Amino acid sequence: MIDTDSPQFWSDLFANTLKATGETLYMVGITMLITAILGTALGVLLVVTERGGILEAPFGQRWLGRGVNVVLGFVVNVLRSVPFVILMIALIPFTYLLLGTSFGNAAATVPLAFAAVPFFARIVEIGIREVPAGLVEAAESLGATRWHLLSKVLLPEALPAIILGFATTVVSIINYSAIAGVVGAGGLGNLAIMYGYQRYSWQYIVIVVIVLVILVQALQSLGGWLAKRLSHR
């Protein structure tokens, strides 16, 4: 049990919290960088390869577009079906093979990315589907290529919804990172377990909750502000 009367207690508490917050931001930052790239690409592929999509017949082969769409949709659904705790444990051999360790901040980004990418891909898919068909038809009538349709119409128009979805994904990953901390990933979750649960310090629990609330509120507000600024409607 921690001696709260110790003159070092509060300084240690703030130092440990600062270190754990940095570890959480590192895990979430790396994960969201991977998620932004792979999730966007995956979400776009899900839309453009579906029937009636701008890439429904890549290389002139309709079966190829259909096959890609079905496989990607199946993979996304499977990954989204697995609870994060089970996914994290199931990926331990893969994480070890990839990074040479299955513990620590860097190792935690692997299961976090596997959880975030399919989630964000569906958000990108939904955002693009909400783009009015009239805009696409107007661009096609003006001779826009597939690349122009994607880069000049679909993605820019869907961007506010994608940003809002990205902020929601970040909040989910912050929560998942706390779960990862339970099994040695570090961060605020690990701090709450080590000091709040195992050493009975309610002060650590309170400060971890406060930091998490501040992070979530700040990121959600930033996402809402950016989406509003970029909205064309």
Image (cartoon, helix red, strand yellow):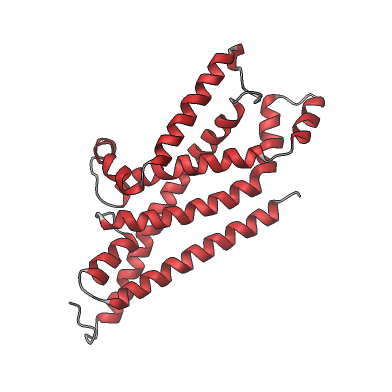
Residue at the location (45% across, 35% down)? 76
Given the current orientation, which residue lies at the most extreme left position? 1
Q: Position of residue 189 (x, y in %)?
A: 32, 62
Looking at the image, which is closer to me, 76 or 166? Answer: 76
The image quarter in which residue 89 lies? top left
The image quarter in which residue 150 lies? top right
**In the displayed structure image, the side of residue 124 where residue 21 appears, left or right:** left
Looking at the image, which is closer to me, 199 or 108? Answer: 199
Q: Is residue 14 above or below residue 132?
A: below
The image quarter in which residue 44 lies? top right
Q: Position of residue 10 (x, y in %)?
A: 30, 81
Looking at the image, which is closer to me, 8 or 219? Answer: 219
Q: Position of residue 22 (x, y in %)?
A: 37, 61
Q: Position of residue 40 (x, y in %)?
A: 54, 38
Residue at the location (24% across, 81% down)? 8
Residue 226 in view in this figure: yes
Residue at the location (33% across, 75% down)? 14
**In the displayed structure image, the side of residue 67 where residue 83 appears, left or right:** left
Q: Is residue 231 above or below residue 95?
A: below
Q: Is residue 91 above or below residue 180?
A: above
**In the displayed structure image, the side of residue 32 where residue 54 appears, left or right:** right
Given the current orientation, which residue lies at the most extreme front position? 81
Residue 109 in view in this figure: no
**In the displayed structure image, the side of residue 228 where residue 6 appears, left or right:** left
**Number of callouts in the render?**
0
The quadrant of the rendering that contains the N terminus is: bottom left
Residue at the location (68% across, 25% down)? 146
